[in-house]
Amino acid sequence: MLATYNILDHIPLGACILREDYVVLFWNSTLELWTHIPRDQIIGTDIRQSYPLLQEAKFKIRLESIFQGGPPAIFSSLLHRHVIPSTLRDGSPRIQHTTVTCLPTTEGGGFHALLSMEDVTDPTRRMQEHREMRDQALQEVEQRKKAVRVKDEFVSMVSHELRTPLTSITGSLRLLIGGVVPLESPQAWAMIDIANRNAERLLRLINDILDIQKCIFQKFAQSIEPGSRQKEGTGLGLNISQKIIELHDGQIGFETQQGEGTTFYFNLPVWNANAPS
């Protein structure tokens, strides 16, 4: 019997042959290497004693069909990775793709089951790495799209903020240059003061933009209580703070009570120097 199946010792697959009562008739050299079980130790025994997994219904039903001469059964590496469990040199489990086919008995009139197990650990790991790289690439694409979208919103907002003081400065200068307001009149000095204050506002805005030109932003508005004077500034302070904190995977929020003021707070994750960049 053993000599009949010796050719299976020369294939790069794990192979064993089972009788209808699950007794092992052949155990090739590859399985000896994988499982560290010598063939003379397992041949003639019920394989379910060594591998109870084969008693489960999902295996039993398919094997019974094979013993009746049914079509091949496939236990894919995606769902059934370890039909005959074995480990690699690093201790990790070997991932298997197993095919079971019927094999006519040498006596005739019946069928044995031939289990052929292919080691697909390396291609499976490479496939997993490919999926992870693909997912990372897709994530980076989405992040870039988001960055472009936020940048466009920021440019739109800043354009509006720049246009307002420039319009005021231009209007004041045109009135003065056109002679509509006499240069020595109090109205002229008021126009010059308006132009000066808007020029200072424009300078502050440009300085803010230069400081945070690489951040992605959302719109913020100044909160003004009835009867209070609008504070000086560009309106970008909270904007800048929020995006800097979000770029560090943090969150910012606030708590407020009328008449008592507002408290702003933020949370940042603990920095791990060993975390992958």
Image: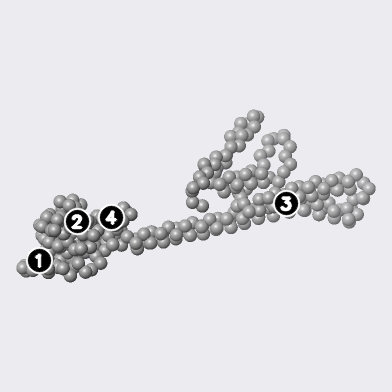
Q: Are marks 1 and 2 in contact (CB under 8 Å)?
A: no
Q: Position of residue 107 (x, y in %)?
A: 5, 68
Q: Are marks 3 and 1 in contact (CB under 8 Å)?
A: no
Distance between the alpha carbons at the discs numbered 3 and 4: 64 Å
The quarter of the image holding the N terminus is: bottom left
Residue 177 figure quarter:
bottom right
On the image, numbered disc 3 is attached to which residue? 206
Distance between the alpha carbons at the discs numbered 3 and 1: 89 Å
Looking at marks 4 and 2 on the same chain, the residue that comes earlier in the sequence is marked by 2
Looking at the image, the residue that sits furthest to the top is 260
Looking at marks 3 and 4 on the same chain, the residue that comes earlier in the sequence is marked by 4
Q: Position of residue 219 (x, y in %)?
A: 62, 48
Distance between the alpha carbons at the discs numbered 1 and 2: 19 Å
The label on residue 1 is: 1
Q: Residues within 10 Å of mark 1 (few under 14, many from 20)?
A: few
Color scheme of the displayed model? one colour
For the point 76% across and 50% down, the residue is: 203
Observer able to see residue 13 = yes
Label 4 is placed on what type of residue?
Thr
